[in-house]
Structure formats: structure tokens, C-alpha cells
Image (cartoon, rainbow, N blue to C red):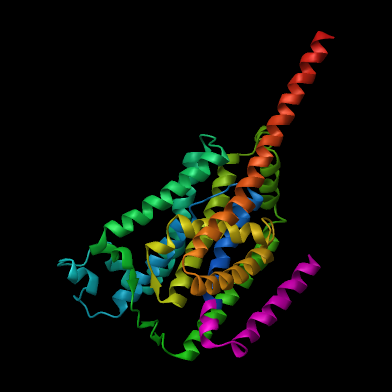
Amino acid sequence: MQRSLVALLLMAVILTVLPFLVSPYDLSLMGRFLAVGLVALGLVWAWGYAGILSLGQGIFFGLGGYAIAMHLKLSALSPGELPDFMVWNGIEALPWWWAPFRNPVFAILMAVLLPAALAFTLGILLFRRRVTWVYFSLITQALALAFSTLLISQQGLTGGFNGLTNFASFLGQSFADPIFQRGLYWATALLVLLVIGGSLALRSTHFGLVLRALREGENRTRFLGYDVALYKAAAFSLAGFLAGLGGALFTLHAGVVSPAFVGVQPSIEFVIWTVLGGKESFFGAVLASLLGGFVRDRVSSLFPDLWLYLVGGLFVLVVLLPALRSTYRKGAEGVEGHGRLAQGRRA
């Protein structure tokens, strides 16, 4: 624990001085990638500790991003005025569910509580039925694809394929102000550090120990009297909460949110950064998100069509192959065990 605190302090110092060492563009990228790091931290809890591989974190990331973006669009309008994309699509009145997002407190709360509640509900529904990790991964991936398709189809309500953009200010501060951009970066870095520190403390609690126990042996944990579905749903809800927070911060840094940040590809990228950093490493998840984000930015700028193939290859190498190897090994051990049992009976 002491070494973790030293590492946390060292990370805090580095993140604090970075704004004075990099360009404004790279600082903006740093803020975005730190926000993605929050999603990876959530996956450390869901996948690394609870054994839940979600391929749909883009859903919660997008919910957080759209929640804060709705506030940003409304805060720039006069009472009774509509966002530009609604006018273009013939919408004559602001939808009732848009109106509360004019309040910044409501928007911030919805950015984190809505993803957390949705993740918990989905988790309870699936884990009560003892859905295996393979089917859970496929279901979450399908939901991510469906959510991005829904956002694109409802152009008059969500901005469609282009999403929500052209934000002017947040809480009265202009996005064009370099001082605000630096403050936003520091706020994001502080939240990341707080989440890492909280995670380090939480993993040693009863909750953290139970999660690790059910990951190693779900049936044994259930036989000990623990509500496995509830614990797994709680871990998934925590991952949803952090993904929503990351989505909201990413939108503030990027100045845009669209279905491209919600679908299958970003969800897979979140998983890749998590596994490259180490499924159980909170520091590794953030560092991998930072380094991977910069690699993605550079590769995409030089070879726009190459990144998608790299993502697919990385996903197969670092996620699917180890999982399939583990499943095959367990199956082989089971067959061998049954064979020995049969030999013992014949003897």
C-alpha cells in the first residue's frame, strides 16, 4: 500500500506540471485521454476484479457525454429558443425530457447516475439468470451497436450522425479561454487521482475481497452465502458510473459528442487499454489510456484507415485469445478429470 501511495503522489506531481510542458493541443488530448482512463478504471473493477467483460461501455460513456452536451447546448440559448439541429429537422417545441438539462447540477448528476442505474439494472437482470461471460459480452456489444444506431436515427432529438457540438461555455467560462482549458485539465486529473486513491482503498475492503473471490470461484462464493448477482451488478454499476463521468469530461475537453463515441469500436478500445495496462492495475489502466490515446492520434493522422485494423488485431491478441485459451484449458482439464474418474471406477 505504501508503494501505491508513493506512485500516486508521483503521478500527481507529473500530471500537475504537464500543462507547463506541452502545447495547448496536446494538453487537450491529455484531458481527453485521462477521461478515457476513468472508463478503463471502471473496467478494472468490472473485469479485473469481478470477471465481467463488458463490450458495451460506450453506452455509459455516451450517456455521460450526451447529458453534459445537452446542458451545454441549452445554456447557450435564450428561453424558448431551440437548438439549431432541432430547427433544421422541423421540431417546434423543446422535448420535455430535454428541459431539465438546462440546470447544470441536474445534467452533472444525470451524467453519472443514469449510467450507474442502467448498468445496475442490466447487471441484475442478466446475473440473476447466471448469464456466462461470453453471452454477457455479446449482449453488451449488441446494446452498444443498438444505442449508436438509435442516436443516429433520431436526428431531430440527438443531432444524428453529427451529434452535439459547437459549445460556447460551461458554468459561465468560455471554452476558448486557455486558463479555463488548463483548469479543466487539472480538474480531470484530480478526479482521476481521487478515483485511483479510492479504488486502492476499496479493493482491501470486504467488497473488494468478495469480488476477487467470485472471480476466482463464483460457485464457491455463492455456496458461502454471498449474493453473487448483487455483487457483480454493483461492480458493473461502478464501471457504468466511471464511464459516465469519463464521457462527460471527454465531451468538455473535445467539444463534441456523437454516436462515434458510443458504439462498438470505442467500447473495444476501452477494453484494450484496460488489458494492456493490466486488468487489475489502476495505474496501468490510466497510463495505457494515455499512451494508447496518443498512439491512436498519431496513427490516425498519418494513416486514417489503418487504426481500425490495428484495433481489431489488438483485440484478438490481448482479449479473445487469452480468454479462449483459458476456456480450452478448463475444458481439457475437465475431460482429463472425467477420464481419470472413469479409469478409477473400472479399477
Indicate whether residue 15 is drawn in magenta.
Answer: yes
Q: Is 23 situated above or below 247?
A: below
Quarter of the rendering occupied by the C terminus: top right
- Identify the image quadrant of residue 278: bottom right
Indicate whether residue 60 is drawn in magenta.
Answer: no
- Identify the image quadrant of residue 96: bottom left
Residue 150 x, y percent position in the rendering: 32, 54
The residue at the point 21 percent across, 68 percent down is: 86
Q: Is 170 situated above or below 258?
A: below
Image mark count: 0
Residue placed most toward the observer, 79 or 261: 261
- Residue 78 visible to an observer of this rendering: yes
Residue 142 x, y percent position in the rendering: 43, 47
The residue at the point 67 percent across, 35 percent down is: 328
Residue 151 x, y percent position in the rendering: 32, 58
Quarter of the rendering occupied by the N terminus: bottom right
Residue 230 x, y percent position in the rendering: 56, 43
The residue at the point 63 percent across, 41 percent down is: 324
Q: Is 181 situated above or below 160?
A: below
Outermost residue on the top side: it is 346
The residue at the point 21 percent across, 73 percent down is: 82
Outermost residue on the right side: it is 347
Judge left or right: residue 272 versus residue 90.
right
Instruction: Please tell me whether the stretch drawn in magenta is mainly helix, strand or loop.
Output: helix
- Residue 96 visible to an observer of this rendering: no
Extent of the magenta region: 1-29
Q: Is 18 situated above or below 123?
A: below
